Image: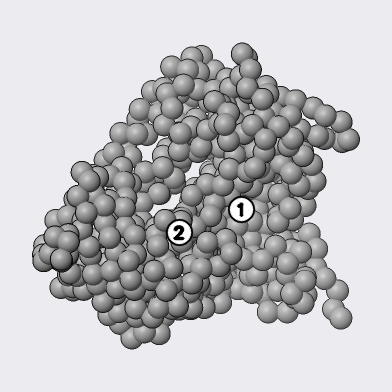
Amino acid sequence: MTANAEEQPTLRADVLVIGFGKGGKTAAKALGRLGRNVVLVEESARMYGGTCPNVGCVPSKGMVHHSRERRPQDDPQTFYERSVEKVQDVREFMRKGNYDGLNGLETVTILTGKAVFTDPHAVAVTRQDGERLTVTAETILINAGSRPVVPDIPGLRTSRHLVSSTGLLESRRLPQRLAVIGGGYLGLEFAAIYQRFGSRVTMLARGERFLPRADADVAEAVHAILTGEGVEIVTGARLREVRDGADGATVVYEHGGAERTVTVDAVLPATGRVPATGGLGLEAAGVRTAENGAIEVDGHLRTSQPHIFALGDVNGGPKFTYISLDDSRIVLDQLAGEGKRSTADRVAVPNTVFMTPPLATVGMTEEEARAAGHRIRVARENVADILLMPRAYAVEETRGLMKFVIDADTDLILGAVLLSVDAQELINTVALAMRHGITATDLRDGIYTHPSSTEAFNEVPSVVVHEDARG
């Protein structure tokens, strides 16, 4: 470490990583093991490992699990408080493990502080103890993540009852009444979690159609499950105002031409996330961004500065941890491999909403497949009717459906929706089949363990409910 004219220490590295997310930490560890001198800067000590293990996937899925375990005789507040404590114990275990896993490498230095670019090869880091230093590197990876969007609704941002998903998951107090603003996947997940814990949940979705990106039959099935659990779903809601009062927050919205209200203890905006690029000083680095703040990258994740890469949510791609992981593979291939891997290699990327039962999807919907010009065969069956899926009855979860969209001319799977027990695992098998050109018939004729949810594949692809006529 050296000092400049202002006596500010300078740390020189081969690779600088900004952000401790999945992509950044994976690349840092791999490059460190290859002997590269790596410096990783993370703004918050509680975020070692990134969003997923600390404030995202792991705690939320932990709460999904515990919410399913609550019995009618359990006191909601006591059970909820105990569940939060257990989930936070897991979060701390993973946070420490992520830190120790990198800190144990002699080639990797972890700095906790705020990083701001001062030129294309240098950042100024202000550490939590107030110390300032400069880090310079030939190669820089930006893995700064994303932040939630709070919509511009009068009174919302200043409301005492406004909560983020992070704050909600960490609070020991179960809201008796919860308003979820937004009808997307995050909203579905949190509505399902808190209704099962004992909250009265109202979901206010702006769109007239529930789950507009899903086929109508799938959206209808999801709607039936959530409302059957007790969630109130209002579509076509135009939010006007949030007013704090003695009894909580009153959310004012327009629906069906009339003004309506709901009074709650907590208001959760679930209206998306945007790249967390503000304050990074990207202008000083010459790194271009899109209008929404996302860092512009090419197929190899290089920014407008060829030595700077952007990984994960910050580059505006799909906001999934496994995409950030795949980003690290692309970057590592550029830095230490053949340089051939790119984002164009990604096909059949699955997704899961962890409601109960889980909603997992991959590929095209029925509507999208037709719009793309395919002549399709649609196979669909309600889980309760799948005779070759005894596990659903064994675990007493027979709600939902399975649906396959198949190219009628090639028998290749174009897309699938699994709304069922174990769907989060099953969808990976379907995605693998799609990536390797395994036909629907091959999937149907596979040999699967018994009794398992996978056995459903022996039946569902044959239950054809529609096939387009030949042109």
On-image quarter of the N terminus: bottom left
Q: Is residue 360 left or right of residue 124?
A: right
Sequence-first tag of 1 and 2: 2
Q: Quadrant of residue 303?
A: bottom left
Q: Secondary structure at mark 1?
A: strand
**Label annotation for residue 38:** none
Question: Which residue position holds label 1?
Answer: 418
Q: Residue at x 67, y 66 (%)?
A: 364
Looking at the image, the residue that sits furthest to the front is: 5
Judge depth for marks 1 and 2 and give the one in front.
Answer: 2
On-image quarter of the C terminus: bottom right
Q: Compared with residue 402, is residue 163 higher up or lower down, i.e. above or below? A: above
- Residue 123: percent from left, percent from top: 29, 64
Residue type indicated by callout 1: Leu
Q: CA distance from mark 1 to mark 2?
A: 35 Å
Q: Residue at x 71, y 32 (%)?
A: 241
Q: Compared with residue 187, is residue 412 higher up or lower down, i.e. above or below? A: below
Q: Is residue 414 left or right of residue 239?
A: left
Question: Which residue position holds label 2?
Answer: 277
- In the foreground, 368 or 273: 273
Residue type indicated by callout 2: Thr
Q: Residue at x 17, y 61 (%)?
A: 6
Q: Residues within 10 Å of mark 2 (few under 14, many from 20)?
A: many
- Residue 263: percent from left, percent from top: 67, 22
- Residue 351: percent from left, percent from top: 55, 56
- In the foreground, 201 or 373: 201
- In the foreground, 470 or 98: 98
Q: Secondary structure at mark 2?
A: loop
Q: Quadrant of residue 14?
A: bottom left
Q: Residues within 10 Å of mark 1 (few under 14, many from 20)?
A: many
- Residue 182: percent from left, percent from top: 66, 42
Looking at the image, the residue that sits furthest to the right is: 257
